[in-house]
Image: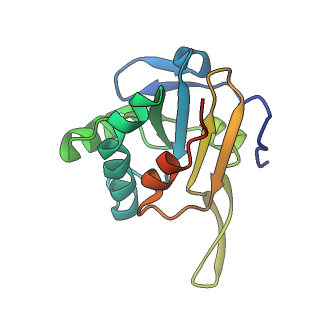
Amino acid sequence: MKLEKGQKAPDFSLQGSDGKTHTLADFGEKRLVLYFYPKDDTPGCTTEALDFTEYVPQFAAQNTVIAGVSPDSPETHQSFIAKHGLGILLLADPDKTCIEAYGAWGEKKNYGKVYEGLIRSTILIDAKGVVEKIYYNVKAKDHAERVLRELPAS
């Protein structure tokens, strides 16, 4: 099920790379960039994570935090962060509950083959927990810059 702009963002409870459990409410009075990616330490996912890390100060200046979500474990997230010097929170969703609730799981096509998988997606959630902007089927390269550039005035 795909999300729609203006709807309440689905709540979640996910283990973070920081060892804490995070829910939507934990982000409080900040805007949240919640981005979904297939797998730690793969080329596209590394590019996207490094790009979001690069723009952390600019997002923070606009009262916005970034969290990445994948089916990987918190331990894999920690290794990924350490290996690449990432400065963002990564959330583990091994059951894909959050991934599915946010419409980031579905049919994909690759070289003519159809299969179910994670759809690279980003959801911008305002400080009240409402979906502000949705990006499905994104390309990793330059995506973080695009999200930053298109942040609505708060």
Q: Position of residue 70 (x, y in %)?
A: 49, 44
Q: Nearer the viewer, residue 10 or 64?
A: 64
Question: In the visual, does 100 lie left or right of 48?
Answer: right
Nearest the eye: 151 or 87: 151
Q: Is 139 drawn above or below residue 93 in the view shown?
A: below
Relative horizontal placement of residue 151, taking residue 60 as reference (left or right): right
**Residue at left offset 64%, top offset 56%:** 136
Give the left or right position of residue 154, taking residue 65 as reference.
Answer: right
| Residue 26 position by quadrant | top right
The quarter of the image holding the C terminus is top right
Q: Residue furthest front?
A: 153
Relative vertical location of residue 22 with respect to residue 9 in this rendering, above or below: above
User: What residue is drawn where x is 72% and y is 29%?
Assistant: 130
Q: Is residue 71 above or below residue 140?
A: above
- Location of residue 77 by image quarter: top left
Q: Which of 73 and 32 is in front in this view?
A: 32
Q: Tell me the residue at 52%/44% (across/down).
A: 35
Quadrant assignment, res 138:
bottom right
Q: Where is residue 140 in the image (x, y as percent from the top left)?
A: 45, 61
Image coordinates of residue 126 in percent, x first then y, are: 63, 29
